[in-house]
Image (cartoon, coloured by chain):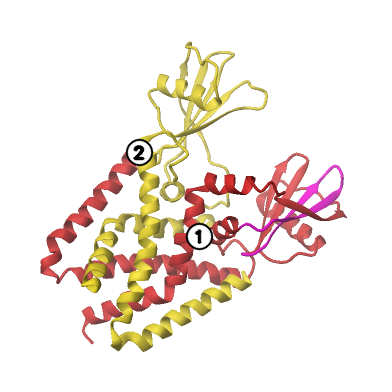
Amino acid sequence: MEFQHLNRRIHLYMGLALSPWILLYAVSSIPFSHGRFFDDLDKAKQLPNWTKAAEIAFEAPVPEGRQELRELGRAMMRTAGLEGAFGAYRQGPKQVNVYHHSVWRSTQIRYLIEERRLVVEDKRFRWDHMLTGFHAKGGFEQDSLLHDSWGVVIDLACLALILWVASGIYMWLPMRNLRRSGMVALAAGAVSFALFVWLL
Amino acid sequence: MLSKLLRRIHLYTGFFLAPWVLMYAVSTVAMNHRAWLSGETNEGPRWEQRAERSFDGVLGEGTAGEQARVILAFLDLDGAHNARWNPDKTALVIQRQQLRDPLRITFTPSDGKVLIEGQPARTSALLERMHRRRGYAQDYAADDVWAFIVDAFIIAMLFWVVSGFILWWQMKATRRWGLAFALGGLAVFIGYAITL
């Protein structure tokens, strides 16, 4: 098999295999780009975003460091009976928040330090938030093999994007009748992009 | 004829948007490995003083955004920004969203001082700003055009997938392997969507 043939097959099969990711990132970019529109649609429903699920007595020292704060977050997750991906944030001098998120569900645990209790709240499902959450889902900051493997898949999808560009250009090179127009499209894109980076 | 047209659109949109494809790919890797690249995890940006000026003009009534435009015009830095007064109304804090060099501008009415701060240049931070840049919320033409191109990029991605599938189906020799790759990818994706 000559290299050009192999290049075409890689371009095609990689695209077919990764098409769900491309569709996810394309569709989920719409609520990112038009967030205000989706927020206004949702506000019109006049539904609460959070529903209280539990209140639990809890007391633990609040550390300063980010890594130690994650340890506290883990303890809050355990106390609330939750497992999975989470982030821990110091909301203010009197509160620490843990945000537990999966693709389909989000739960917030608020540690009210002075009141020595946890308030567990479930987030109402919204399609636009599910999509943006899935879009933004990283992997390596979590402590599980599953999330690490998702991080690797994201890296592979990015590598595929770069390979698509490279293999696309390599397929175009022998097409003499498209050389000039292809060159114009490439140059126009590069100049436009550079202009925006300069202007914005 | 349809096949030829699809191939041409697939190619030309891909070529024009290639810089955006590369930018989104590289910036995603940078964000995916943020802790490793920056040696920190989600810490706030480090600000360094660039200049200090005295403002003796009039801010006028209006929103924080409108008042920020007066300060930005005074500094000859008008452009995309967010602004808010701090809780005790002692300072107007403006985030001037320049892609290459974002600035924080703090105006304190009590002494008329305008403090301008910037961040040390970091490639990973620049890539992340490009990735997250959206435009429609700002009143500037360049931002609107950028947002329009992002929308065009979204449509192009959908088109690349759909046209890719159509072009693949026309190549009988690749149907079996193509189906295996497409179904394999879909199965892995659904697995992650259920378990993550």
Residue B105 is one of the magenta-drawn residues: no
Pointer 2 or 1: first along the chain:
1
> What residue does disc 1 label?
B32
Look at the image and give the colour of chain A.
red
Residue A41, percent from left and from top: 58, 48
Residue B43 appearing in the image: no
Q: Is residue A109 magenta?
A: yes
Residue occupying image coordinates x 85% and y 50%: A117
Residue at 56 percent of width and 51 percent of height: B40
Please provide the residue range marked out in magenta. Answer: A103-126
Mark 1 Cα shell of 10 Å, populated few (<14), some (14-19), many (≥20): many
The residue positioned 73% from the left and 66% from the top of the image is A83
Q: Residue at x 43, y 46 (%)?
A: B122
Residue type of the residue flagged with mark 1: Asn
Secondary structure of the residue carrying tag 2 is helix
The residue marked by circle 2 belongs to what chain? B
Which x, y percent locates residue A105?
67, 62
Which label lies toward us, 2 or 1? 2
Same chain for the residues under marks 2 and 1 in the image: yes
Give me the chain that's yellow: B
Quadrant (top left, top right, bottom left, bottom right) of the C terminus of chain A: top left
| Residue B81 spot, x, y in % from top left | 47, 33
Q: Which residue is mark 2?
A: B142
Label 1 secondary element: helix
Q: Are marks 2 and 1 in contact (CB under 8 Å)?
A: no
